[in-house]
Image: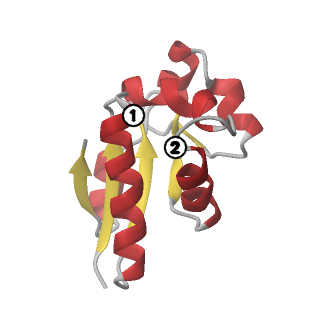
Amino acid sequence: MKKMVLFVFNGDPMCFIHVLLNALDMQTRGDEGRIVVEGAATRLIGELAKPDHALYALWEKVKQAGLVEGVCKACSLKMGTLQAAQDQGLTLLDEMNGHPSMARYRQEGYELITF
């Protein structure tokens, strides 16, 4: 089993969909794929929770599968989506001056993939 963490910085929904699909595909193939929502991508958090959003069903599937490791606390605060992340029960990651630490994941044996 490979361990991969997908850091998604890009706030474009067309990029984000590929992160969601790849995390599910990794899980289906027996690998561990985790998603960390960072940077401009945190702006999508509130939109994805709306049932009429095109990615809503996929987002819910990924969350229910336990594939969302968390959301950058500093970036979600900056983008105005901190409360939306909390409302969805997402973990706020802040161990590196308010941001998630890539080094921690490397030390835990994860391969890093950025979007």
Residue at position x 60%, y 57% from top?
Answer: 63
Q: Relative to 70, does residue 39 appear above or below in the rendering?
A: above
Q: Relative to 41, does residue 113 appear above or below in the rendering?
A: below
Q: Nearer the viewer, residue 36 or 51?
A: 51
The residue most toward the right is 87
Residue 22 position, x and y percent, is: 33, 61
Q: Quadrant of the N terminus?
A: bottom left
Residue at position x 47%, y 23% from top?
Answer: 75
Question: Which element is circle 1 on?
Answer: helix
Residue 112: quadrant of the picture: bottom left
Residue at position x 58%, y 68% from top?
Answer: 65
Q: Are marks 2 and 1 in contact (CB under 8 Å)?
A: yes
Q: Which mark is residue 78?
A: none
Question: Which element is circle 2 on?
Answer: loop
Residue 28: quadrant of the picture: bottom left
Residue 17 position, x and y percent, is: 38, 46
The amino acid type of the residue labelled 1 equals: Pro
Q: Quadrant of the C terminus?
A: top left
Q: Which residue is mark 2?
A: 55
Q: Earlier in the sequence, mark 2 or mark 1?
A: 1
Q: CA–CA distance between discs 2 and 1?
A: 8 Å
The amino acid type of the residue labelled 2 equals: Leu
Q: Relative to 20, does residue 93 appear above or below in the rendering?
A: above
Residue at position x 51%, y 54% from top?
Answer: 69
Q: Residues within 10 Å of mark 2 (few under 14, many from 20)?
A: some
The total number of labels drawn is 2
Q: Nearer the viewer, residue 99 or 12?
A: 12
Residue 3 position, x and y percent, is: 32, 72
Tell me, yes or no, if residue 32 can be seen here: no
Q: Which mark is residue 13?
A: 1
